[in-house]
Amino acid sequence: MAIRKIREFGDNVLRKQCKEVKEVTGRIRTLVEDMIDTMYENNGVGLAAPQVGVIKRIVVIDVGEGPIIMINPKILETGGEQFGTEGCLSLAGKMAYVRRPNYVKACAYDLDMNYYEIEGEELLARAICHELDHLDGVLYIDRKESELMDSNYAVEEEE
Ligand code: ZN
């Protein structure tokens, strides 16, 4: 288990166009394991490789139903709309209102480079959109429709 340092807003790595993964090497397996550990350690619902400084098209997501590993993911279909607050581990303690589709169908490869498709609604749809944006250097604050707000208070209340 290894926790990696999360790159924060202002770090150029978060604005890069990430590269496709051609082969899952041992290094990539370790990266994915570390990304999952890092996501859980920080109580996140998702993490993208550039957030740990790696410019590759890999994201991990867990909305409470176990980890989902997405290599070279693509959105195939979207539907509906949701409007709610969103945060990011690269902008700790902040949140803003962002409009996202309420339904997303995406495809990706798993760690064995097997193709699969996944459908998600609500939080999972939001997480897929948010994490896939990271792979193109897009942050939720680029899409926000409200002021950036402090989420510290709510987080401290829970703890
Ligand atoms: Zn994020």
Image (spheres, rainbow, N blue to C red):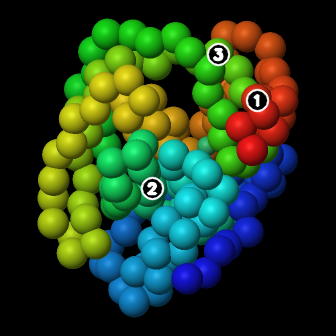
Question: Is the Cβ of the residue at disc 1 closer than 8 Å to that at disc 2?
Answer: no
Looking at the image, residue 67 sits to the left or right of residue 14; the answer is left
Tag 3 secondary structure = strand
Dividing the image into 4 quarters, which one contains the C terminus?
top right
Quarter of the image where the N terminus is located: bottom right
Left or right relative to 14: residue 34: left
Q: Residue at x 51, y 49 (%)?
A: 46
Residue 117 in the image: x percent, y percent? 17, 46
Q: Nearer the viewer, mark 3 or mark 2?
A: 3
> Which comes sooner in the sequence, label 3 or label 1?
3
Q: Which quadrant of the picture is home to ligand 1?
A: top right
Q: Nearer the viewer, mark 1 or mark 2?
A: 1
Q: Would you call the spot at circle 2 few (<14 residues within 10 Å), some (14-19), or many (20 or more)?
A: many
> As shown in the figure, which amino acid type bears the numbered disc 3?
Tyr
Q: Give residue 59's mark.
A: 2
Q: Which residue is mark 1?
A: 154
Q: Nearer the viewer, mark 3 or mark 1?
A: 1
Describe residue 130's horizontal placement relative to residue 85 as left or right.
left
Q: In the figure, residue 69 lies in which quadrant?
A: bottom left
Q: State the separation of the CA atoms marked 3 and 1.
A: 15 Å
Q: Real-space Cα distance between discs 1 and 2?
A: 26 Å
Identify whether 2 is placed above or below 54: below
**N-terminal-most mark, 1 or 2:** 2
Which label number is shown at residue 97? Answer: 3
Percent position of residue 44, x then y = 58, 49
